Amino acid sequence: MSSKTPATISADDVTSWSDDVDVIVIGFGIGGGCAAVSAAAAGARVLVLERAAAAGGTTSLAGGHFYLGGGTAVQQATGHADSPEEMYKYLVAVSREPELDKIRAYCDGSVEHFNWLEDLGFQFERSYYPGKVVVPPGTEGLSYTGNEKVWPFCEQAMPAPRGHSVPVPGELGGASMVVDLLVKRADALGVRVQYETGATNLVVDDGAVVGVAWKHFTETGAVKAKAVVIAAGGFAMNPDMVAEHTPALGQPRRTKHHGLVAPYILGNPNDDGLGIRLGVSAGGATKYMDELFITAAAYPPEVLLTGLIVNKEGKRFVAEDSYHSRTSAFVLEQPDHTAYLIVDEGHTEMPEMPLIRFLDGYETIAELETALGIPAGNVATTLDRYNKFAAAGEDPDFHKQPEYVAPQDNGPWAVFDLSLGRAMYSGFTVGGLAVTVDGEVRRGDGTVIPGLYAVGACASNIAQDGKGYASGTQLGEGSFFGRRAGAHAAHGALGAQER
């Protein structure tokens, strides 16, 4: 699969345009759909080019979490106080390099965005799931999906659950309901969608993007536009780009019956990075291309989080009650990407999702160290220190919440393997084009490329890495900034028309 940057086409070389519109949107996932709807609502003539035979993209595979807060109707109905300021403080704290204008806009506009989503034609259930899970078991509308209650963030902002789930049970596919509603809204607003039509090149004129070249099977052409919004997904399905930027996402694991198996990619076949490469072709800069969301969750059951996660030296390195992708990101920083979860007999249950491997039970810690190849005495020292403080409900080293602190002193001890290449990891990319708060694509010097926008998984906004990620961020920011980009593109296009 290609990782090359496609060439741009000069407008002077286009002999005829197949169409002339105000705004072209490349891709109809959550970001592209929201951009198209918002641009059309602002009065723009909008055309969407979608490579697949139907709308949705990777969004249609998602469970349907939206990271929203600031006092939504669900938060209020379930008795969870929140404010835009507390949400802002939290997102700033977990970001590698917080873009304050984006975080401020996202938090201040979160309640309005929640209402806008419901106005599409569904309602988040006014209910709360209290446990620590990857996906709520039913249709609960609210749960904790990040590190809000994890130290040090719990001291930097008031914790509040912000994972809003659509009322569709299950881990995959719930967001497709939102896509279907976006398709209906787009149709009602007069948005035209050309399916099985892929963008191939951007058309430029004196540094500005003025159109898109396309291909539909053997047919080709070019559409003229005053603004182009790229919403074509990430690059997790492009092995060459993954090898270059996020090699851990291609790290195979050895299985008992199927040989070497790569991590499960959370994406669709068209997540090949073309959208990012199109933006780069016009001079766009990228951010966080080497960062990713990758995870092998150790919970549920959450009782396992009372145990210790250690590296191959027998040392703890992360608070075990962290959100699962935060824990996994720290695993990837350990020697040989190796980590083990150790729990005693009184706290051992089998994971509800078999993502981490149960290795064995060991009668003594010395036996455990020998079996894992950990230097003699290291786990014993780590465990003794942990148990001493855990007996008083304390964890001075990593500050786990009290409900996850318990002595692990009743052998035998069970060991689960969290190592990359042995646990069943899954993930996606988070890097993309550098954009403004309104989705305008930036050059390396910070200036914007006239007429070019990017949203969704091919743009860099709130999500910057796995350590600070919370479930629902991709759908939340994709829809929110998709709306902003669509509206901004439309206003610019219509303003140019008037001039």
Image: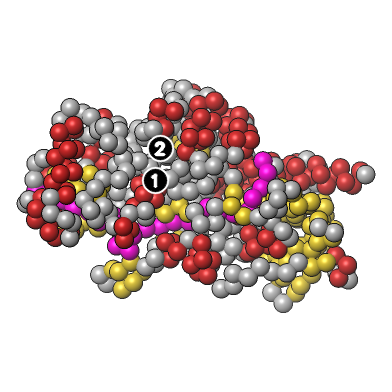
The relative height of residue 438 versus residue 210 in the rendered view (above or below) is above
* Image coords of residue 391 (percent x, y): 15, 30
Q: Secondary structure at mark 2?
A: loop
Q: Secondary structure at mark 1?
A: helix
* Number of marks in picture: 2
Q: Which residue is mark 1?
A: 326
Judge from the rendering whether residue 148 lies leftward or rightward of residue 313; answer left or right: right
**Residue under the point 7% across and 51% down:** 364
Tag 2 and tag 1, C-beta contact below 8 Å: yes
* Image coords of residue 484 (percent x, y): 69, 41
Q: Residue furthest left?
A: 363
* Image coords of residue 493 (percent x, y): 83, 47
Which residue occupies the foreground of this view, 307 or 218? 307
Q: Which residue is mark 2?
A: 147
Specify which label sits upstream in the sequence, 2 or 1.
2
**Residue 420 in view:** yes
Residue 416 in magenta stretch: yes
Instruction: Say which quarter of the image contains residue 499.
Output: top right
Which region shows up in magenta? 412-437
The relative height of residue 215 versus residue 158 in the rendered view (above or below) is below
Judge from the rendering whether residue 350 lies leftward or rightward of residue 48; answer left or right: left
Residue 191 in magenta stretch: no
The relative height of residue 183 versus residue 200 in the rendered view (above or below) is above
User: What amino acid type is highlighted by mark number 2?
Assistant: Asn
On-image quarter of the N terminus: bottom right
Which residue occupies the foreground of this view, 105 or 46? 105
Instruction: Say which quarter of the image contains residue 263.
Output: bottom left
Label 2 environment density (alpha carbons within 10 Å; few <14, some 14–19, many ≥20): many
